[in-house]
Every structure is written in C-alpha cells, then in structure tokens.
Image (cartoon, rainbow, N blue to C red):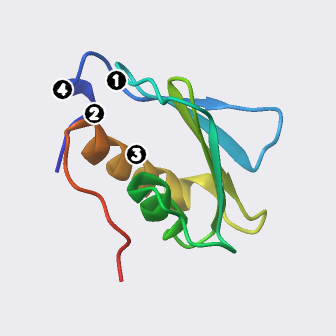
Amino acid sequence: MSNPESMSGAIVAKPTPNPNARKFVLPGVHFGASRNFSADRPADDPLAAALLGLDGVYNVLLAQDFVTVNKFPHVEWPDIEAAVQAILAGYLAGNRIGRSG
C-alpha cells in the first residue's frame, strides 16, 4: 500500500463548512481546470471514478491542489476516509486508478 507521506508531503484532510464534505489537499498536484463529478453520471476521470465507486460518496470536485469528496449524511467519515486516502495515495504514487467492479 502506498504511503502518502512518501511524496513531497502528506495528504492533508480538512473539514469544510459542510459536514458531509471533506477537502483533501494533495502535495505537488495541480489540476488544470476545476472539474465536478457526480455519482449519477459516468466519470471520465479515473481518480474521480475511483472515489465515486466508494459506498456513500456522491460527488467529487477536482480543483487546484485539492479534491473535495461529498458523502451522504448517513455515512460517517471514519467509514470511508481511509479508503479515500488510499485512492489518493495511489494517485500520488502514479498508480493507475480505475473503477473497481
């Protein structure tokens, strides 16, 4: 399993004003234009598709140097944050990310 701290820094998870959204700052990453992905439409981005494949995630925003993940209110962050971190660590390590099936 990839260690996010092996990059130029650690992935930093930050709360947002919305308790169902969490911002994950990725060291050394800069996404071009901001892109928003929703679970009700197929994502053409492998990172967004992998995150949307997690139970309870319904929206993903890729912008600047961060990813914002939105979850359904009935899902608790401890239930999915480790999986989000693992997907993001794999992305930082350069691993191919695809939708799990």
Q: Position of residue 1 (x, y in %)?
A: 16, 51
Residue at 31% x, 17% y is 9
Numbered mark located on residue 4 in the image: 2
The answer to which of 8 and 34 lies nearer the viewer is 34
Q: Left or right: where does residue 92 sit relative to residue 46? A: left
Q: How far apart in space, not on screen, are marks 1 and 2 (Cα)? A: 5 Å
Looking at this rendering, what residue extends furthest in the bottom direction?
101
The amino acid at mark 4 is Ser
Q: Give the mark nearer the N terminus: 1 vs 2.
A: 2
Q: Give the mark nearer the N terminus: 3 vs 4.
A: 4
Looking at this rendering, what residue extends furthest in the right direction?
17
Q: Position of residue 73 (x, y in %)?
A: 78, 62
Q: Which residue is mark 1?
A: 10
The reply to whether the C-beta atoms of the residues labelled 1 and 2 are less than 8 Å apart is yes
Helix, strand or loop at disc 3?
Answer: helix
Q: Which residue is mark 3?
A: 85
Numbered mark located on residue 6 in the image: 4
Q: How far apart in space, not on screen, are marks 4 and 1 (Cα)? A: 8 Å
The reply to whether the C-beta atoms of the residues labelled 3 and 2 are less than 8 Å apart is yes
Q: Quadrant of the C terminus?
A: bottom left
Helix, strand or loop at disc 4?
Answer: helix
The reply to whether the C-beta atoms of the residues labelled 4 and 2 are less than 8 Å apart is yes
